[in-house]
Amino acid sequence: MTSIEPKYNWCLQLRETLSEVGMGFLWDNPEANMVSSFRASLIEKMKHKLTSDDHISAQKSKTIPSYCELKKTGDAEELLQKPTL
């Protein structure tokens, strides 16, 4: 088996991401209904991971270093929130 960098392979990216959020067992389970039953939990964990990754990236930024001081939460800006009907 050749070694492929996850950077160029979406399947490997997905497998790594599932493992990072503690849901690697979904990759190993062939049943589609298993993914469906953990969908809400997976979405929440992914939101948290991506928000955390964005915050860390903002802290390391040389172009917008002060943004992370202004924005402590990962919530979307108010103007980006969906309007309620």
Image (spheres, grey):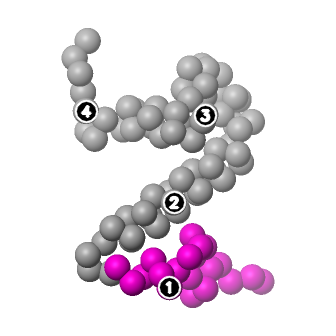
Q: Which of marks 4 and 2 is in front?
A: 2
The three-letter code of the residue at mark 1 reads Leu
Mark 3 and mark 2 lie on one chain; the one further toward the N terminus is 3
Picture coordinates of residue 30, whole percent (x, y)? 60, 19
SS at mark 1 in the image: helix
Which residue in the structure is indicated by mark 4? 5
Compared to residue 23, the image places residue 78 above or below, namely below
User: Is most of the magenta stretch helix, strand or loop?
Assistant: loop
The reply to whether residue 11 is in sight is yes
74 part of magenta stretch: yes
Residue positioned 46% across, 32% down in the render: 15
Residues in magenta? 65-85
Mark 3 and mark 4 lie on one chain; the one further toward the N terminus is 4
Q: For mark 1, does the 10 Å Cα neighbourhood hold few (<14), some (14 to 19), or many (20 or more) residues? A: few
Q: Which of marks 3 and 1 is in front?
A: 1
* Distance between mark 3 and mark 2 Cα atoms: 17 Å
Quarter of the picture containing the N terminus is top left
Mark 1 and mark 4 lie on one chain; the one further toward the N terminus is 4
SS at mark 4 in the image: loop
The three-letter code of the residue at mark 3 reads Met
Picture coordinates of residue 11, whole percent (x, y)? 40, 32
Residue situated furthest top in the rendering:
1
Which numbered tag is attached to residue 23? Answer: 3
